[in-house]
Image: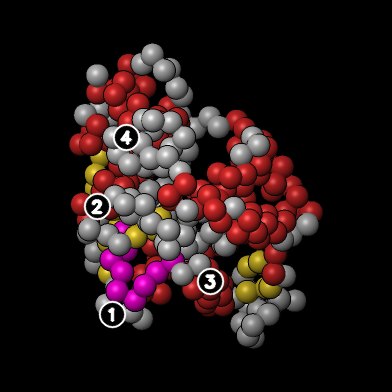
Amino acid sequence: METKCTKCDEPAVYLRRYTAEMLCKGCLVKTSLDRVRRTINKNQMLKDDDRIAVAISGGKDSAVLFDIICNIESAYPRSEVVPFTIDEGIEGYRDKALEAAKCLVKDRGMKLEIRSFKDYFGQSLDEIVKHRYESNFGACSYCGVLRRRAMNDAALEIEADVVATGHIMDDESQTVIMNIMRGDSKRIARSNRSRSHPIPGFVPRIKPIMELSERDVVAYAHHLELPYHDIPCPYASEAYRTDLRLFLNEMEHKRPGTLLAILRSAEDIVDAFQHVQDSSKINHCERCGSPTSLKICKTCSLLDEIQG
Ligand code: SF4
Ligand code: ZN
C-alpha cells in the first residue's frame, strides 16, 4: 500500500527520520524552506535589504542553499542574491564543478561571479601543492585557509553584507565533536560568531541550511532536479573527519536526532562562551586584523611563504 505524506494526502517520497515525518515532494520542499527560515530568524542571520553573496561550489549542498535562499528572498524585494564561486584551481575537479554551478545559476537567470586562487594569490592550488613549500601542509590545509581569505576578498569586492555558505547539519555536528575531541571548545564559540559581533574588514558568514541533514539535501536536490557535481576532490583525505562521519552516521541511524542534539549543545556552548565573542578581548593579526592567537595569523604566514 502506498504511504501517504504526514502533512497532506499525497504519496510520500521521503522519510525525514529525525522528525519522523513521511513527506511528499511538495511538503519536502515546503518543510525544508520552513526549517531554513526558522534557522535564519532564530539566529538573526539576514536583514530585509541585505546583499547576500551565496557561495556556490557546484556540489549538492550549495545547490540546495542557493535554491532555498532564492525562494526565501523572493519575498524580500529589497534584498539581493549574488552567487559566487572560488576556483581553487584543481584540475579535473573544480573545472567540472564550475560547469554545474554555472548551470544552476543560469536556470535562475543570474550570472556567477568567479574568483580564483590564481587571481588572488598568484598560484592555483595544484601549483601550490606541487611546489612543496617548507611548511609542507596537506592540500586541504592550504585550501581551507586560503579559501576563507579568498571568500572574504570576493565578498568585499561584491560589496556583500553577508556571505551564505552551504554547511549542513552533518558538517556542523562533525566540526563540533572534532573541536571537543581536540580540547578546543572555545573554537565552537569563535566559529559561530553572530552578526551582532562583527570584525572590521570581515564580511559576516552565515550557514542558513545548517539544520538540514545530508539526507534532506540529497532528497531536495534529487526531487527538484538541481544540477550538481558529485565527484570527490582528488585531494580529499581528512581521515579524522571521515572516521567521525561514519561514527555519527551510525549513531544518527540508531538514534535519529543525534546530530540535531549536537547542534543544540553547540548553541549552549556558544552562549556559555559569550565573552569569547567580545572582539575587544581577542588578539588581531598585525597584517590583516583577523582574530588570531598569534601576532601574524595563519593565512598571512602562509601567504608570506607562497608569495615569497
Ligand atoms: Fe580543498 Fe581539500 Fe576540499 Fe579539495 S578536499 S576542495 S583540497 S579542502
Ligand atoms: Zn592576518
Q: Who is closer to the viewer here, 159 or 200?
A: 200
Asked whether residue 103 appears in the rendered view, the answer is: no
Mark 1 residue CB less than 8 A from any atom of ligand 1: no
The residue that appears at 67% across and 57% down in the rendered structure is: 265
In the structure shown, which secondary structural element does the residue marked by tag 3 occupy? helix
In the rendered image, the quadrant that contains the N terminus is: bottom right
Marks 1 and 2 sit apart, C-alpha to C-alpha, by: 22 Å
In the rendered image, the quadrant that contains the C terminus is: top left
The residue that appears at 56% across and 56% down in the rendered structure is: 274
Q: Amino acid at mark 1?
A: Pro
Per the image, the residue denoted by label 4 is 286
**Between marks 1 and 4 in the image, the one whose residue lies nearer the viewer:** 4
Q: Residue furthest right?
A: 254
**Which numbered disc, 4 or 3, marks the residue that appears first in the sequence?**
3
Q: Is residue 42 left or right of residue 62?
A: right
Return the mark for residue 77.
1
Q: Residues within 10 Å of mark 3 (few under 14, many from 20)?
A: few
Q: Quadrant of residue 187?
A: top right
Q: Is residue 19 left or right of residue 142?
A: right
Q: Amino acid at mark 3?
A: Lys
Return the mark for residue 242.
none
Marks 3 and 1 sit apart, C-alpha to C-alpha, by: 21 Å
Q: Position of residue 217 (x, y in %)?
A: 53, 59
Per the image, the residue denoted by label 2 is 156
The residue that appears at 20% across and 52% down in the rendered structure is: 157
- State yes or no: residue 46 in magenta: yes
Per the image, the residue denoted by label 3 is 42
Q: Quadrant of residue 79?
A: bottom left
